[in-house]
Amino acid sequence: MRSDMLTSTLTDLNGTSADIEATGIISTDGLMMASALPANLDEDRVGAMSAAMLSLGDRTAQELARGTLEQVLIKGDRGYVLMTHAGEEAVLTVLAKPNAKLGLIFLDVKRAASSISEVL
Amino acid sequence: MAHDFEQLTQYARSFTNLTVENEALLKEVGPQIIPHLKTITENFYTQLGLIPETQPFLEGRLESLKAMHTQWLEGLFTKNFDVSYTEHMYKVGSIHVQVNLPVEFMSGGMTLINGQLIPLVVNLFGEDADRCAKVLSAINAATGFSLLTMQQSYQEASIAEELEKFLKISGMSRVLFSNLAKAYN
């Protein structure tokens, strides 16, 4: 049931923008809870890497006195990886195209993270 | 291999030629060698004392270290090189890590010990070149076995210590790190 709700949230999020290529909800231990990933991406690696990056982001924000972490954004020449907390126990990861309109994506991701947090 | 001491014992044997015959020979010559081991220990610590880097590890505990050292040396000529010996030496290696002993101290120390034992053996058995060579080979096997098992523990304990530091700095839980490692197996 919860799994369906999480998947539905991801489907909605993917539908909000053609710039979003993949999404995943991951436990803070790095295990995938729900995902909408293309076949060429390994679920385990996306999950573990996302949680690790967010954990490192938390520590960096704390260590460099930047307050509570809101998101981690990675930009490569083939696109973006955006990671954000979805409640205390989960991470929401979004992969987006290089020309993505980040303002809209940030907004949609924030809403989705809030929704996921309520489900969990 | 970390805590499979049977496997580590066989592994260390395969490198050091610590055969049943060598073990038996060590026990056979033990009564002749053991009376000299306190002197060997004294000389060993005298040599260590000449190396400034060793000082912080010796100060205030020299006598207890000497006693443990002599006991270990005697064990080379009395004990079986079995799983419990391997486990003991593995723990000795771990203790060395805990006190932040530089890794080269172990191999350097073992070289100094062999350097002390060789002239003793030549003095005791030099008239029979074949026996002298066999005793030296057996001692080399025993000290090599001890060094290898200690270093194995040292290596693993050092890696574990580094990992612990990394987890603390990065904020990652051990479970997350384990899942990350599994994902890339």
Image: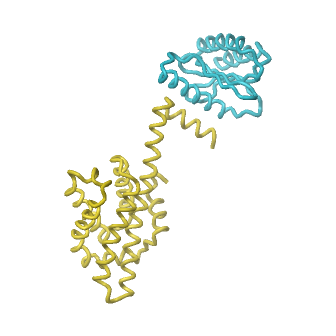
**Residue B10 as seen in the image, left or right of residue A110:** left
Q: Is residue B178 above or below residue A8?
A: below
Chain letter for the part of the structure drawn in cyan: A
Instruction: Tell me the residue at 25%/66% (across/down).
Output: B41
Q: Is residue B23 above or below residue B45?
A: below
Q: Is residue A101 above or below residue B168?
A: above
On the rendered image, what quadrant is the C terminus of chain B found in? top right
Query: Which residue sits furthest right?
Result: A18
Q: How is the image coloured?
A: by chain
**Residue B143 as seen in the image, left or right of residue A20:** left
Query: Which residue sits furthest bottom?
Result: B127
Along the viewing direction, whichever of A120 and B66 lies nearer the viewer:
B66
Along the viewing direction, whichever of B158 and B176 lies nearer the viewer:
B158
Instruction: Tell me the residue at 35%/70% (across/down).
Output: B114
Q: Is residue B92 above or below residue A94?
A: below
**Residue B12 as seen in the image, left or right of residue B101:** right
Instruction: Tell me the residue at 35%/68% (across/down).
Output: B80
The image position of residue B101, as x and y in percent, is 35, 51
The image position of residue A75, as x and y in percent, is 69, 25
The image position of residue B160, as x and y in percent, is 45, 44
Along the viewing direction, whichever of A95 and B113 lies nearer the viewer:
B113
Residue B112 occupies which quadrant of the picture?
A: bottom left
Chain letter for the part of the structure drawn in yellow: B
The image position of residue B22, as x and y in percent, is 39, 76
Total label count? 0
